[in-house]
């Protein structure tokens, strides 16, 4: 009784206390995030307006928007932008299509799903840099790699999978797809498993064809999960680094140099941190714009 | 085979076999590079370069002996990775769990905005963070230190852990919390004794993910590390430039470097799938 009375009398205080409690729990984490992420970003923006060339330190100084103006006439920048689009678009589409198809198939297998789930975990838990190294040596090396062994025995000959510019781009797309398709597969499989079976039963009695059943029943039900997979996979692809870095280093030349790698190489190989920072700002803007657009899309459709 | 068209049962069986075959191919493609790496790690360098590839060979432990106790032993690197990963994981969980509870359950001003802020920090490309960290740490002599690497690891682990924990806190029934509060237990005690035990599973899953991500991290470690703090992912990368053609040794090193995450992956398989799903279906999209 006393509790209820106090609660009635002291309603605002209770609310105040909840607020204070929330603040006490949240403030340390938020403060830490401001210090570790937002402050460095301000510094990044400031750096992007500077000329900081550790190779030629005497030229350093304020450059205004000079770094950004420089991008317009920098073919390597436009190339990296194009590669980012191709790399992100193709890997995300491949992951979702293959993952979805495989999940739909596997759902119909009565036994052995568990084994497949275990195998799917393997690529996900591996460090991308190790994946890149594995592919560079054991899988894609000319003559002795697994892929070359297969193509040679099929009479398709030996290829320099990471040394030829076009093949190298296909190779790094394949590596990324190999590593992250299991994510799409596992998430979609788990989502499919939660769907009520009677929806399907009804459709089956209606003699709905498999494709129609998929388009009209399954797909709308799993769309939120698929959209979320697309968002998360896009973010990963945009900031992909270690696997490409280990497999090709961005090369040959700049054949696999997505914007992320270009920003890295400019900053830490060529030691031009000012220009590197401005490239990173562009990538940051792109990432935020794309994620914003995708979340809006998701909310409107949901 | 012509009879299979007639009877329903055998058609079903044929379908089952076809499905299993497709699943088998998927399985082989995902698991094989890892199995092949494991086999390679027991080969001599001669056997590695054999064509056609050897499946049956005389296994040797020489590669493991070399990467563990040889001139370029990876033991110190495993130690570095352990310090960074454990440090980052503990700090992350310490800050993320209370924050996630507040975001999931408490009413306070600017709740939406704070949730959105956490989400936005999760989207930041790492290369955008490494440049200012490098410049700042260089000025204060923080390069090649554990502190620097642990702090920058928080930039991706903290937002991620907060969001994953929010989805677990949201699943705790309200009644439970109210009952505890009516029982005159204070907020702190209700959280500690009633809510936290309910999300034990979520805490375990989140800890696993944060540890995996920190262990596998490469970009920050290669830029901010050095001779003193060199994590195992960086050591693996250096391997290929230093010992160009010693793939068996590389494979042995990679197997040791990845042993912790592979073991976690295999043993916590169910939890990982659940964590991925929770994160993908709920996390982030809520607000």
Image: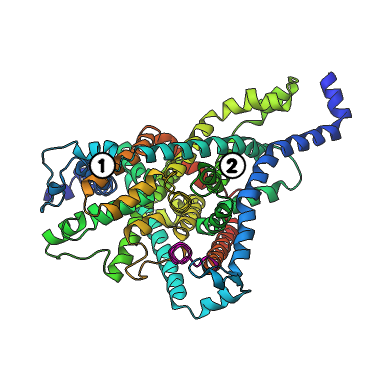
Q: Quadrant of residue A11?
A: top right
Q: Secondary structure at mark 1?
A: helix
Classify A111 as above or below A277: above
Classify B168 as above or below B286: above
- Marked residue nearer the N-terminal end (2 or 1): 2
Q: Residue at x 50, y 68 (%)?
A: A272
**Number of numbered labels in the structure image:** 2
Using a 10 Å C-alpha cutoff, classify the residue at mark 2 as few (fewer than 14 neighbours), some (14 to 19) or many (20 or more). Answer: many
Q: Secondary structure at mark 2?
A: helix
Question: Badge 2 sits on which subunit?
Answer: B
- Dot label at residue B162: 2
Question: Residue B205 or A216: which is nearer the viewer?
Answer: B205
The answer to whether residue A250 is left or right of residue A151 is right
Using a 10 Å C-alpha cutoff, classify the residue at mark 1 as few (fewer than 14 neighbours), some (14 to 19) or many (20 or more). Answer: many
Main SS, magenta region, reads helix
Q: Residue furthest front?
A: A58
Question: Residue B67 or B187: which is nearer the viewer?
Answer: B67
State which mark lies toward you, 2 or 1.
1
Percent from the top left, x then y, of residue A26?
68, 40
The answer to whether residue A14 is left or right of residue B282 is right
Percent from the top left, x then y, of residue A121?
36, 42
- Dot label at residue B252: 1
Q: Residue at x 58, y 46 (%)?
A: B159
Question: Badge 1 sits on which subunit?
Answer: B
């Amino acid at each position: 009784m006393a509790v209820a009375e106090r609660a009635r009398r002291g309603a605002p205080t209770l609310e105040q206390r909840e607020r204070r409690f929330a603040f006490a729990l949240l403030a340390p984490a938020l403060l830490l995030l401001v210090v570790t992420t937002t402050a460095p970003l301000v510094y990044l923006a400031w750096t992007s307006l500077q000329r900081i060339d550790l190779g030629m330190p005497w030229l350093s100084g304020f450059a205004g928007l000079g770094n950004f103006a420089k991008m317009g006439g920098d073919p390597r920048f436009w190339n990296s932008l194009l590669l980012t689009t191709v790399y992100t678009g193709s890997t995300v589409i491949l992951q979702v299509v293959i993952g979805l198809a495989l999940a739909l198939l596997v759902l119909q297998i009565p036994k052995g799903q568990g084994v497949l789930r275990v195998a799917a975990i393997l690529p996900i838990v591996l460090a991308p840099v190790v994946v890149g190294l594995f592919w560079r040596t054991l899988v894609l090396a000319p003559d002795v790699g697994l892929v070359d062994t297969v193509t040679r025995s099929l009479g398709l000959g030996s290829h320099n999978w990471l040394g030829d510019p076009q093949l190298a781009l296909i190779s790094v797309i394949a590596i990324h797809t190999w590593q992250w398709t299991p994510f799409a597969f596992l998430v979609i499989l788990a989502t499919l498993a939660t769907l009520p079976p009677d929806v399907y039963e009804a459709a089956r009695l209606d003699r709905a064809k498999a494709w129609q059943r998929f388009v009209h029943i399954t797909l709308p039900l799993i769309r939120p999960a698929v959209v979320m997979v697309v968002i998360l996979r896009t973010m990963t692809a945009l900031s992909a680094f270690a696997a490409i870095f280990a497999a090709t280093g961005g090369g040959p030349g700049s054949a696999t140099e997505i914007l992320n790698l270009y920003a890295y190489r400019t900053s830490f190989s060529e030691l031009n941190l000012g220009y590197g920072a401005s490239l990173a700002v562009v990538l940051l803007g792109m990432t935020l714009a794309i994620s914003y657009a995708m979340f809006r899309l998701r909310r409107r459709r949901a | 085979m012509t009879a299979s068209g007639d009877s329903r049962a055998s058609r079903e069986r044929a379908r089952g076999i076809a499905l299993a075959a497709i699943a088998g191919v998927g399985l082989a493609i995902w698991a094989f590079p890892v199995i092949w790496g494991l086999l390679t790690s027991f080969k001599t360098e001669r056997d590695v370069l054999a064509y056609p590839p050897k499946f049956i060979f005389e296994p040797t432990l020489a590669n493991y002996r070399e990467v563990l106790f040889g001139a370029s032993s990876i033991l110190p690197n495993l130690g570095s990775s352990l310090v960074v990963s454990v440090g980052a994981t503990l700090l992350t969980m310490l800050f993320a769990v209370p924050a996630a509870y507040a975001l999931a359950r408490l009413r306070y001003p600017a709740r939406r905005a704070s949730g959105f802020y956490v989400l936005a920090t999760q989207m930041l490309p790492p290369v955008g963070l490494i440049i200012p960290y490098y410049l700042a740490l260089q000025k204060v002599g923080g390069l090649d230190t554990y502190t620097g690497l642990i702090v920058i690891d928080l930039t991706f682990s903290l937002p991620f852990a907060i969001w994953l924990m929010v989805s677990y806190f949201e699943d705790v029934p309200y009644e439970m919390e109210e009952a505890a509060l009516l029982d005159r237990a204070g907020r702190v005690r209700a959280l500690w004794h009633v809510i936290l035990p309910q999300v034990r599973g979520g805490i375990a899953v989140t800890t696993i993910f944060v540890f995996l991500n920190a262990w596998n991290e490469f970009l920050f470690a290669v830029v901010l590390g050095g001779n003193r703090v060199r994590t195992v992912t960086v050591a693996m990368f250096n391997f290929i430039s230093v010992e160009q053609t010693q793939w068996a040794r590389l494979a042995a090193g990679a197997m040791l470097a990845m042993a912790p995450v592979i073991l976690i992956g295999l043993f916590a398989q169910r939890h990982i799938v659940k964590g991925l799903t929770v994160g993908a279906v709920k996390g982030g999209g809520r607000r």
